[in-house]
Image: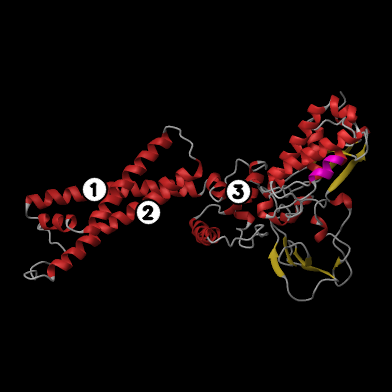
Amino acid sequence: MVKNFVVSITRSTISLIGTALAVATLVLMLSLFMIERFGFEGGPYLGILTFLILPMIFVVGLTLIPIGAVLWRRKRSKMAGGDSVPLMPVFDLNVPKTRHWLLIFLVATMFNVIILSAATYKGVEVMESVEFCGMACHAVMEPEHTAHQRSPHSRVKCAECHIGPGADWFVKSKLDGAWQLIAVALDIYPRPILTPLHDLRPARDTCEQCHWPTKFVGDKLSVRKHYEDDEVNTELTTALLLRVGGSEGVGSTGIHWHVDPDVSIRYRSNESREEIYQVEMTNSDGVITEYSDRKAPEEGGVWRTMDCVDCHNRPSHIYQPPGNEIDKAMSTGVIDQTLPFVKRESLRVIDAEYDSHEAARVAITDGLTQYYSDNYPEIASEKSAAISTAADALGDIYSVNVFPQMQVWWNTYPNHIGHEQSPGCFRCHNKRMRTPEREKITSECDTCHVLLAEEEEDPEIMYTLNPE
């Protein structure tokens, strides 16, 4: 019977194809695995090929082997004199030779299980890597991946925030990913990627794995440099004492009072969460206070329980305004502050829409060079290197914040932290948001911060902070 079983496999074209697929993919998987172990960097595609595509082909090959054997035996049984050929082979374990072949079969099966288990484990590891999320579908996720690499969470894997721990959200994310794969293959994905993500896991299951609400305590000093658009690029300083606050001790204070475990805040807004219509606050005693915007629609909108991402809506995918990026480049010396009107002209050439990063770099370089050649020929000659360096820096700034192929521009993704790039805090903290008794949500400036200096040339507070 063992001989008949082997014959049924070797005589079937389907089984032979399956055997060839299984052997070839096994050799390829082991070879690519060894190449990777020796330090070869193949990007996300090497991992996808080694631990996702090839294992699937390997399984298909193994499946074809018994299918081919059964089909061949069925065909043989229908031939003349084939009545004695059973559809499935019969193994007589009383025969020593049969036991010997069965042992070989079991060992081979265990080997295959080990191979597939290892490939599955590595496959999951690959699918949860930053390279897979950001580079496998490069054109689609290039903006998000680029911003993530520059963010405070650049060492945090995408899956740790977008999936988090547990099997249920892992399965859900892979089901969502299946549709995303189809959308990319058919080129029907939205441009730009739509936000906010309405099916994002609650922050208490992700953000709060590292950021404990009880540890948001105290104040934080923030010093910011800003440059005017005059000829000498006047340097201005703003110093803020941010009341970070928290909920350690007898009660919560400051900005993070919103995440006090004893307080629950819900709000009704439009789909984008840019316009908030109604706020419902439940305090530690269970008393509910409702605030409504008198100009908001009475019906419609989406109710949501407030959590971290309602303020920190760009924690890892931060796109800076052009003015902020230029200020930073000037304060660090990348852009020479002594170039006349460099802040104004930098903003002029960079705050525009170009067809590609390459076109932007050419236009920015030509625009900046032409300005100094026309208006300051001596400076254009003496500081040509500084002008070239400034143009290169502006091209870099444009390339990490604007992505024409995905229709991501300077103002596509507003940041709700503060109230500079968008209404931010003022979505709720405004004069129109009131209770039926006309009590309003506080909107005083010192609720969240204390201004130590506001766009001053040489603020005295800086000497206090840095006596030397």
Lower position in the chain sequence, tag 2 or tag 1: 2
Q: Residues within 10 Å of mark 2 (few under 14, many from 20)?
A: some
Residue 15, magenta (yes or no): no
User: Would residue 364 appear left or right of 36 to someone viewing this image?
Assistant: right
Q: Amino acid at mark 3?
A: Gln
Residue denoted by label 2: 56
Residue denoted by label 1: 108
Where is 408 relative to 78, above or below?
A: above
Q: Amino acid at mark 1?
A: Ala
Residue stretch in magenta: 345-350
Q: Position of residue 318 (x, y in %)?
A: 70, 47
Nearer to me, 296 or 49: 49
Location of the N terminus (image quadrant): bottom left
Lower position in the chain sequence, tag 3 or tag 1: 1
How far apart marks 2 and 3 lie (CA) works out to 34 Å
Lower position in the chain sequence, tag 2 or tag 3: 2
How far apart marks 2 and 1 lie (CA) works out to 18 Å
Colour convention: secondary structure
